[in-house]
Image (tube, rainbow, N blue to C red):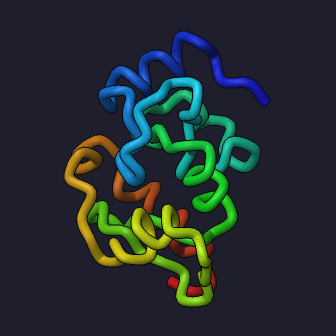
């Protein structure tokens, strides 16, 4: 799959070219992550309220349901997520319940609710 370069640039610019979860700010290490999946919801692929920039590692963790965001943009962590990685402990596990203020008002809360309804652990 391929995200349109102009759309990607818009998403990164809208979020100050920084992953709001990890703080990674190198554009080559950022992905455009979809709340409602790219494959299952093609009609929302280009909806700015359905996307956020995540580092490649955090995008993979989000897609593997290791963490999500609630409707108030708080980090929710899968209770079965265990890791020895200092980075993942610092940026995800230790931040459980923390609000991500830079995302507030930028994501559609109904998309987050729909995404989270599909997660068995939420």
**Which quadrant of the figure has residue 63?**
bottom right
Q: Position of residue 41 (x, y in %)?
A: 66, 45
Q: Nearer the viewer, residue 61 or 4?
A: 61
Q: Is residue 97 above or below residue 69?
A: below
* Residue ID at (33%, 32%): 15
Q: Residue at x 50, y 24 (%)?
A: 27
Looking at the image, can residue 112 be seen? yes
Q: Could you tell me how many numbered marks the image carries?
A: 0
Camera-nearest residue between 114 and 61: 61
Q: Residue furthest top?
A: 6
Q: Is residue 54 above or below residue 76?
A: above
**Who is closer to the viewer here, 118 or 75?**
75
Q: Residue at x 60, y 81 (%)?
A: 81
Q: Position of residue 113 (x, y in %)?
A: 44, 66
**Image side of residue 16 versus residue 36, left or right:** left
Q: Quadrant of residue 11?
A: top left
Answer left or right for 117 relative to 20: right
Q: Is residue 51 visible in the rendered structure shown here?
A: no
In the picture, which quadrant includes the N terminus? top right
Residue at 35% across, 57% down: 109
Q: Position of residue 2 (x, y in %)?
A: 74, 24
Q: Is residue 84 above or below residue 106?
A: below
Q: Horizontal and vertical percent for residue 71?
A: 32, 65
């Amino acid at each position: 799959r391929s995200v349109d370069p102009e759309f990607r640039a818009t998403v990164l610019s809208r979020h100050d070219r920084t992953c709001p979860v990890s703080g990674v700010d190198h554009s080559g290490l950022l992905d455009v992550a979809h709340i409602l999946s790219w494959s299952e919801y093609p009609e929302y692929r280009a909806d700015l309220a359905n996307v956020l920039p995540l580092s490649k590692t955090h995008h993979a963790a989000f897609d593997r349901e290791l963490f999500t965001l609630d409707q108030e943009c708080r980090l929710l962590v899968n209770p079965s997520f265990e890791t020895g990685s200092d980075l993942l402990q610092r940026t995800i596990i230790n931040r459980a319940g923390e609000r991500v203020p830079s995302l507030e008002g930028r994501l559609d809360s109904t998309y987050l609710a729909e995404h989270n309804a599909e997660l068995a652990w939420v």
